[in-house]
Image (spheres, rainbow, N blue to C red):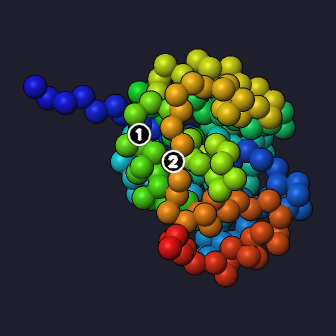
């Protein structure tokens, strides 16, 4: 009997204004390309079907082959509205991986472990909290589509969520300020040891 494999898609959140950064951080150069493209390229290197990029109004981000560009007119209200817009845009997925475009060091291996998880899985941060990247089955899509404001998926208090650690805590570095980006420019991935 053939095995059923759930089709996973990805929603890459790129609608933030970068206020703490002082401007459009996602198009700022990071190792020879716009910052957001590091996360996009990592997602392209794992087995995902649909790829949705959620941007805000008047975004400076240009389209990228293989990605559906979705504008969230409510982006200023917070990340929850972007998750909702991205999940609503999916057409043929049984699961969705939600990623942040200002986390350029997340590895393909970590995304692979999330995709291999059964059910809901969040990334486990070093302080024990759950966050992105995270993966959700279709049964949770209506809840994700109901998010608004700054409430992300953690606010849903989903039962039985698995927490998966990356190989290296540095993978979870995000860029909020110009100083954060400066630090990441000089960082290479180092596995835990």
The image shows residue 35, relative to residue 182, as above or below, that is above
The image shows residue 82, relative to residue 58, as above or below, that is above
Which one is in front, 8 or 160?
160
Tell me where residue 4 appears, x and y as whole percent. 24, 28
What crowding class fits label 1: few (fewer than 14 Cα within 10 Å), some (14-19), or many (20 or more)?
some
The label on residue 139 is none
What crowding class fits label 2: few (fewer than 14 Cα within 10 Å), some (14-19), or many (20 or more)?
many
Label 1 close to label 2 by CB (< 8 Å)? yes
Please give the residue where the numbered disc 2 appears in the rendered image: 164
CA–CA distance between discs 1 and 2?
Answer: 9 Å
Please give the residue where the numbered disc 1 appears in the rendered image: 117
Which one is in front, 187 or 57?
187
Q: Quadrant of the N terminus?
A: top left
Furthest-left residue in view? 1
Q: Counting residues from the N terminus, which is met first, the one under dot 1 or under dot 2?
A: 1
Tell me where residue 176 appears, x and y as whole percent. 80, 59
The answer to whether residue 155 is seen in the rendering is: yes
Identify which residue is drawn at 64% across, 43% down. Answer: 130
């Amino acid at each position: 009997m053939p095995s059923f494999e759930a089709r996973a898609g990805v929603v890459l959140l790129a609608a933030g204004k970068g206020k703490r950064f002082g401007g459009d951080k996602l198009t700022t150069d990071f190792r020879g390309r716009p910052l957001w493209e590091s996360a996009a390229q990592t997602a392209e290197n794992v087995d995902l079907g649909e790829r949705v990029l959620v941007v805000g109004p008047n975004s400076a981000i240009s389209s990228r082959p293989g990605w559906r560009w979705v504008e969230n007119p409510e982006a200023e209200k917070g990340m929850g509205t972007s998750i909702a817009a991205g999940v609503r845009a999916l057409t043929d997925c049984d699961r969705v991986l939600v990623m942040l475009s200002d986390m350029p060091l997340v590895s393909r291996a970590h995304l692979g472990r999330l995709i291999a998880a059964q059910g809901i899985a969040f990334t486990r941060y070093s302080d024990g909290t759950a966050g992105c990247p995270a993966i959700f089955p279709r049964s949770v899509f209506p809840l994700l589509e109901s998010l608004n404001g700054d409430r992300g998926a953690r606010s849903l208090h989903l039962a039985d969520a698995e927490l998966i650690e990356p190989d290296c805590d540095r993978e979870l570095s995000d860029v909020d300020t110009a100083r954060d980006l400066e630090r990441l420019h000089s960082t290479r991935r180092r596995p835990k040891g």
